[in-house]
Amino acid sequence: ILSLPWLNYLEAIIKHFEILREVVSEQIISIGNRQLYNGKRFSKKGIHKVAEEKYLQANYWYGLAVKIEPDNRPAFSKRKTLDPYLEAHLKLGEVNEKLGKYDLAISYYKVVEKGGNDSAGLSIARVYMRQKKYDLADDWLWTILESRGNETFLRQDDSFAFDILKTLAQY
């Protein structure tokens, strides 16, 4: 049995490790944020290969931060914006779609869609339409509509309905 001074010492060490883990994790997230920002800059300039590399780097850093401190991955539900880890996946999907790597784009979009983001589901449907896989696109659109509920879809101020119609009109 450990004496009281040893227990106090161990508690202090544990506390310092928790603080260190938190600080390191925040720094890693900061590096990921820089890579995500750089990816957005290159994507806007049309330099998609470099943008993809930056998004992959951001994804790596965000994944590392989540491994170090799992609480860094915030709950996705009811958030208006994506957490950085999911945003990196969304951007990787967009870049790969532009590069014509449709299967890879879909895999990234599916990660974001599992987080509850309807626009990622729309992106998946759009990619399936580009591949002329209309049955899969139709399945995705109906799944999205069912998950949203008819009342939400029919609201006048909901731009989501417009997005679905716009996606369908492209094909």
Image (cartoon, rainbow, N blue to C red):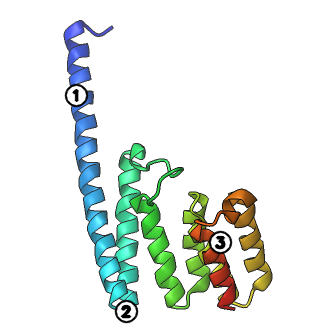
Q: Is residue 44 above or below residue 122?
A: below
Q: Amino acid at mark 1?
A: Ile
Residue pointed to by mark 2: 46
Q: Going from the N terminus, do you reach mark 2 or mark 3 first? A: 2
Q: Nearer the viewer, residue 42 or 148?
A: 148
Task: Say which of marks 3 and 1 sits in front.
Answer: 3
Q: Nearer the viewer, residue 34 or 69?
A: 34
- Residue at figure coordinates x 52%, y 50% from the top left: 78
Q: Is residue 94 visible?
A: yes
Per the image, label 1 sits on a secondary structure element best described as helix
Mark 2–mark 3 CB contact (< 8 Å)? no
Mark 3–mark 1 CB contact (< 8 Å)? no
Q: Is residue 87 left or right of residue 44?
A: right
Q: Residues within 10 Å of mark 3 (few under 14, many from 20)?
A: some
CA separation in Å, label 2 and label 1: 49 Å
In the rendered image, residue 59, in percent from the top left (x then y), is placed at 40, 66
Q: Amino acid at mark 2?
A: Gly
Residue pointed to by mark 3: 161
In the rendered image, residue 143, in percent from the top left (x then y), is placed at 74, 65
Labels in figure, total = 3
Q: Amino acid at mark 3?
A: Ala
Report which quarter residue 38 is drawn in.
bottom left
Residue pointed to by mark 1: 13
- Residue at figure coordinates x 37%, y 80% from the top left: 53
Per the image, label 3 sits on a secondary structure element best described as helix
Q: Going from the N terminus, do you reach mark 3 or mark 1 first? A: 1
Q: Is residue 100 above or below residue 82?
A: below
Report which quarter residue 4 is drawn in.
top left
Q: Residues within 10 Å of mark 2 (few under 14, many from 20)?
A: few
Q: Residues within 10 Å of mark 1 (few under 14, many from 20)?
A: few
- Looking at the figure, which quarter contains the C terminus? bottom right
CA separation in Å, label 2 and label 3: 29 Å
